[in-house]
Image (cartoon, rainbow, N blue to C red):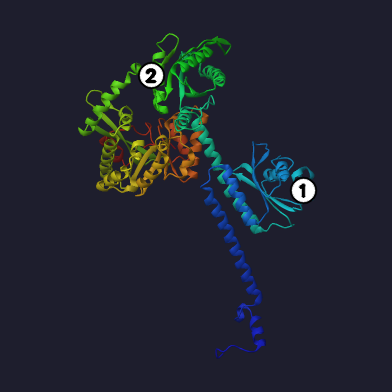
Amino acid sequence: MDGRASDDPGECEEAAEGGPGGGAPTRAFLNELLAAKAELEARNEALQLVNDLSQRFQKRLAVEAIAAETVDVLARHSQAPLVAFYLLEGEKGPLRMVTGRGFTEREMSLGALLPLEGSASGLAVRERRIVTIRRGNLDRRDLHPVVGALSERGLSTGFCIPLTHGERPLGTVNVIFPTEREISPLEIDTFHGIARAVSLAVANARLVADLEHLAFHDLPTGLPNRAGFHRRLLRLTAGGEWPARAGLVVVNLDRFREINDTLGHTVGDEILVEVVARLQARARARPADVFRLGGDEFAVVLPGAESLGEVAAEARLLLSELSQPLRVAGMGLEIGASAGVALLPEQGRDSHELLRCADVALHDAKRTPGGVAVYARELDQHTPERLALLSELGKGIRDGELVLHFQPTVALQYGFIEGFEALVRWRHPRLGLLLSGRFVPLAEATDLMRPLTGWVVKEALRQLAVWNREFPRLTMAINLSMRNILDRSFPDMLEEIVREAGVNPALLEYELTETAIMADPETAFTSLARITASGSRLAIDDFGTGYSSLSYLKRLPVDVLKIDQSFIADMATGPRSLAIVRSTVQLAHSLELGVVAEGVENRESARTLRAMGCDLAQGYYFARPAPAEEAAHHLARGGWLDVPV
């Protein structure tokens, strides 16, 4: 060969007919390569579609938004003129259309609800397979009138793609075409991939909705709980659905503890059900809203109330309803009640202050004939002590009266100490050692919160630097407050303290409650983003007891959820608390977050949490909070604590 192109067509044809072993590839072999390349590109495109859809679902925590996203993607990808998204209602159906595209009004009406028995979609759900719809290919009992309506339009082929999560059927996604066509193996794989992504997104969305409902409602009575009360008042004071005036009646049952101790909690629960029915009946006449604050204490909110006298009159009507004899467990019981009254905005401009004033009045009501008392400043015995303690706190910070206690956080699966939580204490010269609950709320209401938090961070990091010499991966958790994150200069102060301490920021975990975040969400998001930019982690403390929307989890730079100790304590006797804990662990892991159980006090709770895959735990079962020298004893033993197998 001299490198020149041949002019002989026969020579070119002969080269084209050669084989892989003879030099030049054959035409058939080239066609096979092109076909393989096309199939690989199609599969890559399908995989990219599923991955993109999964990424988009991470920003969708509502089922309706997930359905709309799915319909849009399938309509564009498959070029199907009609797409419908169905979800199963209950174990036996029906299937309800969440959203659809391309259907006429008559078709939407006919196909709004589909039975499990008697529809192609129901067949797909029952048999968990893709069902093809063509005239004549379905048993008569699986035909639904909507199929006939679609046929009248000349639509020929449909595919019902089942949605399942684990063993649980969720619904179907249906795509319908105007022409006869077969479904290719690649399309089957793509539809299955989309179905898996959609099913996971729907399951997570339902879990979030269930957890949000549980967070705001009392399980035994079904009433909105304390968190629900604060959320409702927050909307009121923010100029929401009500005018910014309201009365509050806090009702406490008399002798309820005695009845529980004498007749048992079953009878007590029956009494609570009857009490709720009577409160709600009176509330409907007003109208008003009823909340269970906890135990035998209820709150009744009266929107639009103009005076304390008006609210007090309603309180007396409520107590009159409750004073009627109850027929429970075959006996007649009279329980009675007391009520404290406060008015918004005169006695408080937020839910916490209003509730505090009503509680002060309630305390007086228990000593008042008639059982009703309205708030008055002279009844508020806590104010002088509060002011005195607040003035002493600033001096205590400056004079070195604060100390830190440390409580270990244990890796449940292995038993080693992951890190410590720093808890501030006050060695008060007159009152002795005070826990944080006695004085931190006072600091949060003033500018003292900044120097208090600054002292805690400095001391915690100083101790961590000492421990890190032997345990370089040991972490430190530090509590922040609402006032800290609303302080725009606080992130800069925090960064300077960390820099001076010489501690790796990745070993720091800042804890914040949902309530603190929701005081001003936008400012909180900005501040927390700055705080965690250096690599520090953020934990949501007391998770499940706040009143934030869980949809904010996707916007916050959250790394850890800490399950409130009230749920942990009730796991052994309360199946619903156990379900909440298990669901929270699953939610955290599905969002790729760590999860910590607070308040673990016994071996059974630790074993249960370990079995459900909870990552970390802390509580008296492992170790109580203690000064640094006592906490160091755990590290001296190698940093291992007892974890039940």
- The image quadrant of residue 370 is top left
* Residue 398: % across, % down: 21, 34
Q: Is residue 10 above or below residue 645?
A: below
- Disc 1 and disc 2: Cα gap in Å? 70 Å
Crowdedness of circle 1 by 10 Å Cα count: few (<14), some, many (20+)? Answer: some
Element assignment for label 1: loop
**Label 2 environment density (alpha carbons within 10 Å; few <14, some 14–19, many ≥20):** many
Q: Which residue is mark 2?
A: 360
Task: Please state which amino acid type lies under the numbered disc 1.
Answer: Leu
The relative height of residue 125 versus residue 80 in the rendered view (above or below) is above
As drawn, the label of residue 138 is: 1
Q: Residue sitting at 33 percent across and 40 percent down? A: 487
Q: Quadrant of the C terminus?
A: top left
Q: Amino acid at mark 2?
A: Val
Residue 354: image location, x then y, percent:
41, 24
The mark that comes first in sequence, 1 or 2, is 1
